[in-house]
Amino acid sequence: MDRSRPSNVLFVVLDTVRKDRLGPYGYERETTPTLSAFAEEATVFESAVAPAPWTLPVHASVFTGLYPSQHGADQGSPYLDDAVTLASSLSTAGYDTACYSSNAWITPYTGLTEGFDEQDSFFEVLPGDVLSGPLAGAWQAVNDNDYLRELASKLVRLGAMAHAKLASGEGADSKTPSVIDRTRGFIDGSESDEGWFAFVNLMDAHLPYYPPEEYREEFAPGVDPDDVCQNSKEYNSGAREIDDDEWGAIRGLYDAEIAHMDAEIGRLFAWLRETGRWDDTAVVVTADHGELHGEHDLYGHEFALYDQLINVPVLVKHPDLEPGRRDDLVELIDCYHTVLDALEVDPGEFADDASGGDGTSVVPFDRTRSLLSSEYRAFERSEAPDPGQRAVLEGIDDEPAANDSGEIDARTDVGDDAGDGERRGEGYAFVEYAQPVIELHHLEQKASEAGIDLPDDHRAYARLRAARSTDAKYVRADRIPDEGYRLDEDPGETSPVDPADDEVVAAAERALARFEDAAGGAWTDPSDAPADDGDALSEADEETRERLRELGYLE
C-alpha cells in the first residue's frame, strides 16, 4: 500500500437525516457545527442518490455494491444472502473491521454484520445470542419456504416493535454516546498492519424523537415529545391530523436529534485529531435516507421516492478529492467501491477466501464507481457493467434533450466519449422500493382502528422504481400513477410533468425503462396479495411457533 494514502476508513451513517437540515447544505439553524467545519476539508456532494428509501436495502447496497433487486434484502426477504460484504473482503485483506449501531436492521439476524470482526447493535430488547442464533436460522428457513412468507413478515415486524420500545420515552437513553465510545475503543485497540474500517450508524433522527433535554430546549423549547404525533402511520392512514404548529414542534425535535448526533461525531473527530489518526483516516459521512414531515402529505420515509427521502448528504475526506462542492450525480452504492479504492483492495483477487469458498458472489472493484477515481462514471470502461451502468451505456445514442432555447442539453444523457481523466455525461441514478411489509401492516392497523378503509390504489400498496438525473426524475409504480418531475425547475416536486410534454422527463422515463430491462423487468402489475396469516401459521412447526410465542406474536 502507498502509505501516503490513508490506511483507515471511518464510515458514518446518519440514519434518517435529510440533507436540508444540515449546515453544509444551507440549513439556517445551527444543527451541525461539526459537519459544517468538516465540510471545509471534505468534498460535499449535492446530488447523491440512495438506492432505496429505507435502511435495510440501502445498507445492503452499500455493503455489496448491488442494487436492491440484485441483493434481494428487503422486507419480503429481510436478510442479506449469497453476497460477499465489504467487511468480509476488507477483513480477508487484513484490515480490522467493526460495526457499531443502534439500528435494529443492522444485526446478525439480517446478515448485514457479516464479515465484521467486531459488531454491536446496542439492540437491548433481545439478547444478542437470540439475534445471532436460533432466530436467525428460523428467519432464513421460513423465507426460503414459499408457504411461510407471511410468517416471515411477522418476524420482520420484530425490528420495528423493538426499535419503538428502544427509542420511546420509556426506553433507554440515546445509544449514540455508547456507539462513539465503542468505536474509539475499537480504533484504539486495532493492531492490524494494514489498518481499520469502522462503520457507524447513528439512529437518533429516526422516529420517535426523544432528544436529550439540552438539545430539546435549544431546538424545540417547551415541546413535550409525548404531546406530538410520533407515529407516522396514524397520519399517513388519515387517522390523525397535524397542524402547522405541531409540524413545527416535530421538526424542532428532529433538529434536536441531529444536533445531538453532530456533537457526538465532533467528539469522535476531535479524538482522532488528538491521537494523531485524523490525517491517516479517510472519512465518509452520509445518510441512508431522509424523512418527510408533511411534504406531499406524507410523514416518515415510506410509500414514496421524493427527493426529501432519496437525495441524501454525502461528505468525503480523502487526499484524492479536493475540498469543495460537487453537483454532479453520484449513487450511494458507489460508496462500496470508494472504500475499496481508499484502501486499495479488490475483492475479486481473493473472492474464494472472502466467501469461504461457498460460491457466494462478490462484486469486484470497479473504478468507474469510485468517487476517488478520475474515471468515475466513465461506465464504458467497466469490465462487468451492473444494471445501472448498462442503462446509462445503452442510452448513449438516446436523442438528447433540447433546453428552452432549443440548444442541446448535454447533461441529460451520456455524451461523447471522454478522454483520459474526464467523466462522460453523468446519466442517471436508480432507486427501488418493493412493497413494504411492516409499514403496510401498521398503516392498515391504524386505519382499521379509525374506521378507515384504504383503497386498493393507495400508494402504500405500490412498488416504486425511479430514474433520477440532476435535471429530472421519473417514478414508475404498479398501483398508482407514474410521476415525472423537472427537478431543475421544480426541486420540491410539486408539479408532475407528463413525459409526452417534456423531453427531459421523457429521457428519464426511457432511462428507467432501460434499467428495468436490465434488472429483470418492470414493476407494472400489482404484486400478489400476501398469504393469509392462518394459512401461513398452519405450515409452521412447533419450534417456530414457540419462538413466536416468546416474542409475543402468538397467544
Image (spheres, helix red, strand yellow):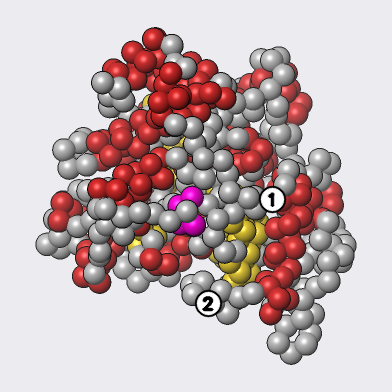
Would you name the residue on which mark 1 appears? Answer: 522
Q: Which residues are magenta?
A: 457-461
Position of 282 compared to 159: left or right? right
Residues at circles 2 and 1 in contact by the CB criterion of under 8 Å: no
548 and 288: which is toward the camera: 548
Residue located farthest toward the left when viewing the structure as drawn: 222
Q: Residue at x 71, y 14 (%)?
A: 357
Q: Residue at x 82, y 55 (%)?
A: 393
Measured as percent of width and height from the top left, residue 197 is found at 53, 33
The secondary structure making up most of the magenta span is helix
Three-letter code for the amino acid on which mark 2 is drawn: Ser
195 and 450: which is toward the camera: 450
Please tell me which of labels 2 and 1 falls first in the chain.
Answer: 2
**How far is mark 2 from mark 1, CA to CA?**
24 Å
303 and 3: which is toward the camera: 303
Say the numbered circle drawn on residue 495: 2
Say the numbered circle drawn on residue 26: none
